Amino acid sequence: MSDPNASDPRSPEPVPPAQTAPEQVPPVVTPAPASPDTAVWAPAPAAAPPASTAPPEPVAPATPAVAAPQEPAPPQYAAPDSTPTVDYGPPAAQPQYAAPDGTAAPDYGPPAAQPPHGTPVASQVYAPPAAPPYGAPPVYGAPPSYGAPTPQGPDNRSKVLAIIALVAAGVGFIAAAIPFVTFGSGVFLLAGFVMGLIALIGKRQGGKGFSLAAVIVSVVGWILAIFMVFFSIGLFGQAVDSSITQGLNGSDPGSGSGSGSGADTATDAQDIVVDESAFGRSSYDDGTWWYVVILDNPNDDYVFDYADIAVEALASSGTILDSDTAYATLLSGQTVITGTFYSVGSGEIDSLSVTGPDASEAITSPLEDTGTFTINDLATTSDSYYTTVTGTVSGDFDQDQSYASITVVARDASGQIIGSGWTSIDRLPAGGTPVQFEVDFYDTLPSGTTFEAYASL
């Protein structure tokens, strides 16, 4: 009988309990790159187990050592200087596989070296072409740079209106520079100014230079036209004066016919005499006064051509309240001057002061050669609003007279002058042909009023 305490030779020997190994940080090993000269590894054939070998005894499993969690180390291509590098030798050779036909696979050598970790891969970057330097001419076909002005083509807008405006302004300017023709220049100047202004501000109209010139010429033409209007009026007045003098003397001014020295200033002429004067406050305005002055030229063979007659309104203290000036040709006999004072204000007119030409200003003109006026057929018609006086005037002058003036004086029943009115006729024919005239009185006239008419040049 066998001993129970005897050990069974087939039983495994007791294994002492495993001891826990101290915790160690596995070293960081940098594998060495494979060398092209490394031998190719091939597995060796497994050996067949011997037939009589007994099965191994079971071994108790060892308790695995638990490693503490470690922070992942950053990838490094070389061990830090503080960590020792473990050299494991060259890497094991990779198995060589053969092609199906038995030939060896080609050896392409080691892989290409890769760039270090983190190196960016170069890529093609588009770079715009450099801008030409300032002042250099642009390259033909190059796109315009940002902010550069877009080239504009020719202005194809119509210039017809601007040209017409300039022509009209030019015609008006030329007309404005000609005496008497200047009165019709305003139409052309206005047309040129309006059309030029439209062409200047209109977006669809071209020829801005023409339109601007038309506006400027029109404005200058207006200024010239205003000046020429006054100049033309002066020439017209001289022409009328010359016509009157020629009609009185039968020749050019200053060459009178008759005895004595002709156009020589009279040496024996007498001064003008004031036969009568009157004044009164207007019925429609208390601050306006009318006046009438009847002058007498006592000289039969002398006239006063276009005489300057000043009439002053005097207060009782002798203060001049207002004055007026009249111009008339004083023929032999009576001539009536009438007018209005507008600046008397609240004052009261006490008398009139009349100043006429001196005797030395008289011109020799015999009565039979000068001519006189004749007034006939004087008549009146009245209603509740106004009174109208009509009549005819004629003259025995050698030539037609222009702008003859007819003054009608109204007197009350006592013969006192209470008002006057006047009118003019454009032409008084020579040879005694009568011309009708008409004068209106708008003030209410008392019953028994009589009227007298006087003609003058």
Image (cartoon, grey):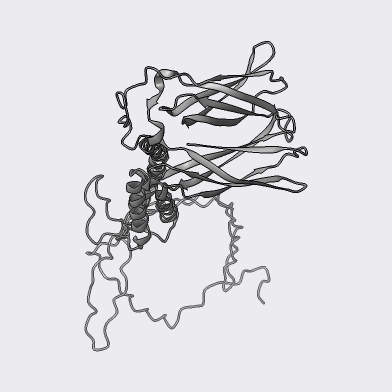
Q: Position of residue 47 (x, y in %)?
A: 37, 79
Q: Is residue 101 above or below residue 29?
A: below
Q: Please, which residue is most extreme toward the bottom here?
A: 101
Q: Please, which residue is most extreme toward the top here?
A: 317
Q: Residue at x 59, y 65 (%)?
A: 61
Viewer can see residue 87? no
Q: Position of residue 269 (x, y in %)?
A: 42, 20
Q: Position of residue 373 (x, y in %)?
A: 49, 39
Viewer-nearest residue: 366 or 279: 366
Viewer-nearest residue: 2 or 295: 295
Viewer-nearest residue: 229 or 65: 229
Occupied quadrant, residue 288: top right
Viewer-nearest residue: 414 or 357: 414
Q: Residue at x 38, y 44 (%)?
A: 399
Q: Residue at x 27, y 51 (%)?
A: 130
Q: Is residue 47 above or below residue 125?
A: below
Relative placement, left or right, of 252 versus 422 is left
Q: Position of residue 264 (x, y in %)?
A: 32, 23
Q: Is residue 40 above or below residue 457?
A: below
Location of the N terminus by quadrant is bottom right
Number of marks in the image? 0
Viewer can see residue 356? yes
